[in-house]
Image: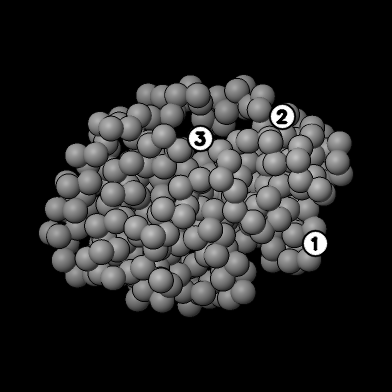
Amino acid sequence: MSDQKLLGELVDIARAFAPYGKVADYIPALSNQNPDDLAICIYSIGNESYYAGDHLKKFTLQSISKVITLALVLMDNGEDEVFSKVGMEPTGDPFNSIAKLETNKPSKPLNPMINAGALAVTHMIKGDTVIEKWDRLIEFICHLTGQQVTYNEDVAYSELQTANLNRSLCYFMKQHGVITGNVEDLLVLYTKQCAVEMNCVDLAKMGAVFANDGLDPESGRQLITKDVARICKTFMVTCGMYNSSGEFAIKVGIPAKSGVSGGIMGSVPGKCGIGIFGPSLDEVGNSIAGTKLLEGLSAKYSWSIF
């Protein structure tokens, strides 16, 4: 990627789709985002970055954090332990659905990218208290970005106050032994995780670590094991864009994870990480302009992995 002007042009083209979506309003603190915002950073594994739009504007990770937590928990606990509590299969149901928990035997979440699966994964972060688990997670995120990041307290509080469906998921999983302990403690940790705040550059840097098989492009340190990076990228392909992941794989073909704040983290294997912020969402919860922007980039640079 060398044409900064072209990147700006692709952003302008994609921004035209923003009016066809709307910002998330079921989390009150997200409802005041500007639907016309659209920004991108591309961070190459050669440690170069390119950007367009307001790329330094901060936003919360929301479901993008599920990929990061999964990587940490896999390295801490191993595949066998993690996948004894959460499955590996995509779902056509909404990300916050409880239906499959009721019908599947055993009653464990289908994958780590839906809310139930993410809650089960967050429960497995090492630590005896919420504070210990949070410190472990935020330290890991700071290593991935190379920056001191924290969380947005207003967004976390707003999510905690409206988390009744997630509470239901937790109590159902507790009844079936997927999680143990205090549900409110888990929700406090999970809402802080979702409210971790950063900009497109930080997000692209994290995506570049996954694209580079877990190696930090800046320092050369192995921050994530190669196999864990592979597993995470696979989930990004099969489950990362909610229940439109199949269509996204055909049209874009880049491992990616979205969040309802409008963020998208992409990882083009062996090439670059991508951080996008566009808070106007389509009907399934993905950034509508951000998705169009990735379509344009993938077509222009032949970035599809398929």
Residue 306, labelled with which disc? none
Earlier-in-chain disc, 1 versus 3: 1
Q: Looking at the picture, which amino acid does disc 1 mark?
A: Glu
Crowding near the residue tagged with mark 3, few <14, some 14–19, many ≥20 C-alpha atoms within 10 Å:
many
Query: Which kind of residue does numbered mark 3 sit on?
Result: Asn
Judging by the rendered image, the residue that carries numbered circle 3 is 152
Q: Is residue 298 visible?
A: yes
Marks 1/3: CA–CA distance: 31 Å
Question: How far is the residue under mark 3 from the one under mark 2?
Answer: 21 Å
In the depicted structure, whether residue 259 falls above or below residue 163: below
Residue, disc 2: 167
- Which is nearer the eye, 23 or 196? 23
Q: Position of residue 22 (x, y in %)?
A: 35, 29
CB within 8 Å, label 3 to label 2? no
Per the image, the residue denoted by label 1 is 81
Q: Secondary structure at mark 2?
A: helix
Q: Hey, what amino acid is under mark 2?
A: Arg
Labels 1, 3: front one? 1
Q: Residues within 10 Å of mark 1 (few under 14, many from 20)?
A: few
